[in-house]
Amino acid sequence: MLLVLLAIILAMGGAMLLNKAYTPEYGLDLAGGTTVTLQPITPNGSAPSQESLDLAVNIIRERVNGSGISDAEVAKSGDNIVISVPGAGQEEVVKLVGTTAELRFRQVLAIGAGSPPPPGQLSTQAPTPTPSPTASGRKGSKEPKPAESATPKPGATAAPDTGASPAGRALSSALTNPSPGTSTAPSTEPSGGRSAAPDKSAAPDASAAPDAGTVPTAPPAAPEDPMAGVDPNGIDPAALKQFETLDCSKDTGRGAQDAPEKQYVGCSQDGSTKFVLDKAAVTGTSIDSASSGVDQTTGEWLVQLAFKGQGPDQWSKVTTTAFNSQTPRNQVAMVLDGVVISAPVIQEPITGGRAQISGSFTQVTADELANQLKYGALPLKFEKQSIEEVSSTLGADQLRGGLIAGAIGLLLVVIYSMLYYRGLGIVSVLSLVVATIVTYQSVVLLGAFAGFRLSLPHIIGLIVSIGITADSFIVYFERIRDEMKEGRRSLRTAIEVAWVRARRTILIADAVMFIAAVVLYFLAVGGVAGFAFAMGLTTLIDIAVVFMFTKPFVAMLAKLKFFAKGHKLSGLDAERMSEAPVASKTVPQEA
């Protein structure tokens, strides 16, 4: 067990080195952060209902502190909502809490260049749409790597740029506009079903439509005509007029409220492409779950969606309609917060109610999009009243005070153990050292992988755990002494018998502590939840240390003559083990 514990410690240390995570992440009270005040806006200008405000608070709290351990705070202040997020910049926090984050799936009706070419630099033909992402019904379909973003160059066919797409978002090649045949685009892949037309040049499980979903070039037309190649059939005249005059280079329309029951004209995230989109076929309320993960075939990050209610049927219907349509109406656009984030080509009607969004994601951006979709749209529209960068409210002084308090508590436990248990006190000291190392590594890794941020309530919970850990040692040591006091057991026998009895007591005590921590964590918010999390974490570490270090180490020490012979400084000498005067009762010694 000692070797197993050593392997765990080395593995955690290796993970820290690989991720270059050497210190914990600090919470709002120790590291400062950003505070955003949101003011609700209602259609008639009246005060919002408390029910809608409470729902908005819960949704925002889930966005900024879904795990409950990031030390982010969300609270109502009158009719306003105040959000405080540790360690984050203004742009990141505003983006996280202010977006509507309702996804709508709309069939593409028309595509055009996002902005007119500059005077004197006119191309000889209309913009050339390029290979679009694909949607197939085969789970685990192997797709090419996502395209890199590019801007169409005046007077020539656009070529891919070396820059990554904005914010690592999933952008379709129809949006980023690279040259046909030189790059491919992200895909939206529903799970389940079969591929309509597998590509024989790809891997056995890969699926693709003929020509890899390439969109044919629009017919030559006057470059100054923004309606070149646009089929007006089925498009609302008002939408056509808006499409003709829209310049995405000036405003991409992010944050626009796209009514689901109407056709919508919108831009890609980088403004290089504009779209006319049909009425929303599937809305964000039909999304059952959203999570990020890694494609086992390509190793790329993706977001997985599952639909609920009428969502699967609606998704099947829109993919069937798109599959039976001509380019570019064989694409289905995903509109998030008024902006088209992807527009995959539909290879076949898709059933099953599941989909995957893949593209130029990183772990951070995939998690961000999944959280936004998972926690739904805000019930109210909000205006940012104020945005402030806040410094640490307690800072280094309070952190230093907490560390000093912990060091004093640890020192007192060490002194008590050495004076009362003498040689056995070495076991308790080393056990505390091991518990400290494992706790520190856990806090650092949780900060790197789960967003855990250390605040004063967490530090209090860690300090309290010193007593919990020491209590486990005392229970075991006293059971060993009880067995030795009977005078009929050798040290080795007493250690094993005492362990059988002591471990039950230790497990019961730690179980009670852990249950209390779990209940407190789920029923409380903010600092109290942080305290409960730290207490629960250290309770689990205490069990691991006692079982994997303390007991095996005591059994190893029992083989030494210093302890086996009952040396006066061992803590197991005859004088301490006797209930009567030493002369009337002796302790059997080992040979």
Image: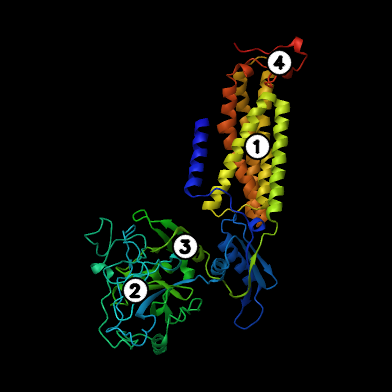
Q: How many marks?
A: 4
Distance Cα–Cα, label 3 vs label 4: 66 Å
Q: Is residue 424 above or below residue 275?
A: above
For the C terminus, give its image quadrant. top right
Query: What residue is shown at x 63% (from left), y 16% (from top)?
Result: 489
Question: Circle 4 sits in a helix, a strand or a loop, which is it?
Answer: helix
Contact between marks 2 and 4 (CB within 8 A): the answer is no
Distance Cα–Cα, label 1 vs label 3: 39 Å
Q: Amino acid at mark 4?
A: Ala
Q: Is residue 44 visible?
A: yes
Q: Is residue 534 above or below residue 434?
A: below
229 sits left or right of 282 in the view = left
Q: Which residue is mark 2?
A: 177
Q: Which residue is mark 3?
A: 365
Tell which residue pokes out farthest to the front in this image: 120
Question: Circle 2 sits in a helix, a strand or a loop, which is it?
Answer: loop
Q: Which residue is mark 4?
A: 574
Q: Residues within 10 Å of mark 3 (few under 14, many from 20)?
A: some
| Circle nearer the N terminus (2, 1) | 2
| Circle nearer the N terminus (1, 4) | 1
Query: What residue is shown at x 63% (from left), y 56% (from top)?
Result: 27
Q: Which residue is mark 1?
A: 469
Which is in the foreground here, disc 2 or disc 4? 2
